[in-house]
């Protein structure tokens, strides 16, 4: 599988990561402003596709995908003050006092809905305040071509406090699938009907990917910090799903909602978090 770096590194690295000195700051102006960009793709290599273009799994299933879409949750910039490492805010693992996190906010124990940005700032401790930018809430259909993920308006106009960018995180809420699953085993070893099983629905596969970064925010550096994150969904996505159970779920030959398959959401989330790729390139600009 190709690396997302092939998509973003060449045009950005030449100008990115270079620090310009002598930048002036006015009273009340931010030390920095972020420009987050998130792109995504799903491009299985030849070893993961059969001659008909179906996705192969490690357990001898072939999946003819009509549509695969990802519901992204947020992209987060984790900062540390004065060069210290960021304490971090992970929507999939919120800090004490907060519960379910989705759609750009978390449920506080006292009943409030608190935006990611506020929680990220708390998670930053005494250092620089972290920045979490929610995705726009639409399912993003993925294929081999890189696709931009729409983001909500950046909290506080993407203002960055003095410190260092230490890590970039991308959080995912769900996978939406429209496909037909076939069994490559035949005869008495077959686990699905020869015609396959239609699968359509949403899996609440919540996962977070992180990538280390290093860029200072403060005196002598350009105000602008463009953070270009490229996420590539793993072709191992459905390796852990028990598609055999889909045969029972389609007693009348109807389609299966994958969320009804035991352990499917957990298996997909584990595959995303453990095997997907996230590449980050930072560019400085005035």
Image (spheres, rainbow, N blue to C red):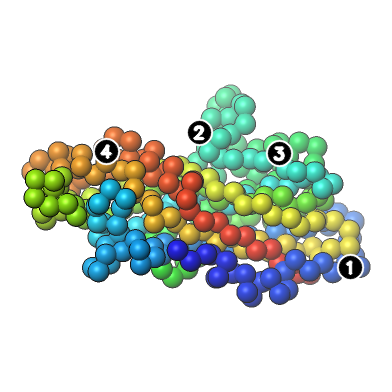
Identify the image quadrant of residue 65: bottom left
Q: Position of residue 207 (x, y in %)?
A: 48, 44
Q: Which residue is label 2 attached to?
A: 100
Report how far apart the C-alphas of labels 1 and 3 lie in the structure: 28 Å
Give the residue drawn at x 57%, y 66%. Answer: 5
How dense is the environment of label 1, judged by Cα within 10 Å: few (below 14), some, or many (20 and up)? few
Q: Which residue is mark 3?
A: 87
Q: Answer left or right for 185 relative to 213.
A: left
Q: Residue 14 location in percent, x, y? A: 71, 74
Q: Are marks 1 and 3 in contact (CB under 8 Å)?
A: no
Most distant residue in the top direction: 110
Against 249, is 110 above or below?
above
Give the residue number, with chain letter if any, for mark 4. Answer: 261
Number of other residues with Cα within 10 Å of mark 3, as a class: few under 14, some 14 to 19, many 20 or more:
some
Q: Quadrant of the N terminus?
A: bottom left
Q: Earlier in the sequence, mark 3 or mark 4?
A: 3
Residue under pointer 1: 21
């Amino acid at each position: 599988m190709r690396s997302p770096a092939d998509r973003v590194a060449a045009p950005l690295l030449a100008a990115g990561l270079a620090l310009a000195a002598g930048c002036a700051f006015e009273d009340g102006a931010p030390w920095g402003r972020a420009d987050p960009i998130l792109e995504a793709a799903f491009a299985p290599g030849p070893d993961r596709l059969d001659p008909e273009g179906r996705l192969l799994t490690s357990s001898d299933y072939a999946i003819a995908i009509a549509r695969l879409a990802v519901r992204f949750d947020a992209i987060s910039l984790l900062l540390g003050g004065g060069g210290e490492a960021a304490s971090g805010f992970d929507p999939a693992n919120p800090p004490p006092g907060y519960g379910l996190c989705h759609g750009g906010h978390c449920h506080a124990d006292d009943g409030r809905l608190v935006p990611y940005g506020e929680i990220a700032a708390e998670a930053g401790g005494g250092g620089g305040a972290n920045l979490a930018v929610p995705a726009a809430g639409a399912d993003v259909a993925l294929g081999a071509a890189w696709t931009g993920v729409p983001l909500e308006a950046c909290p506080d106009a993407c203002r960055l406090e003095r410190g260092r960018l230490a890590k970039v995180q991308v959080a995912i809420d769900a996978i939406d699938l429209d496909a037909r699953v076939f069994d490559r085993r035949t005869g008495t070893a077959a686990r699905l009907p020869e015609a396959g099983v239609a699968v359509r629905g949403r899996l609440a596969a919540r996962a977070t990917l992180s990538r280390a970064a290093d860029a200072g925010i403060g005196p002598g550096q350009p105000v602008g910090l463009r953070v270009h994150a490229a996420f590539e969904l793993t072709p191992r996505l459905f390796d852990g799903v028990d598609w055999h159970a889909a045969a029972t779920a389609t007693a009348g030959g109807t389609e299966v909602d994958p969320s009804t398959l035991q352990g499917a959401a957990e298996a997909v989330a584990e595959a995303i978090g453990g095997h997907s790729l996230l590449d980050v390139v930072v560019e400085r600009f005035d």
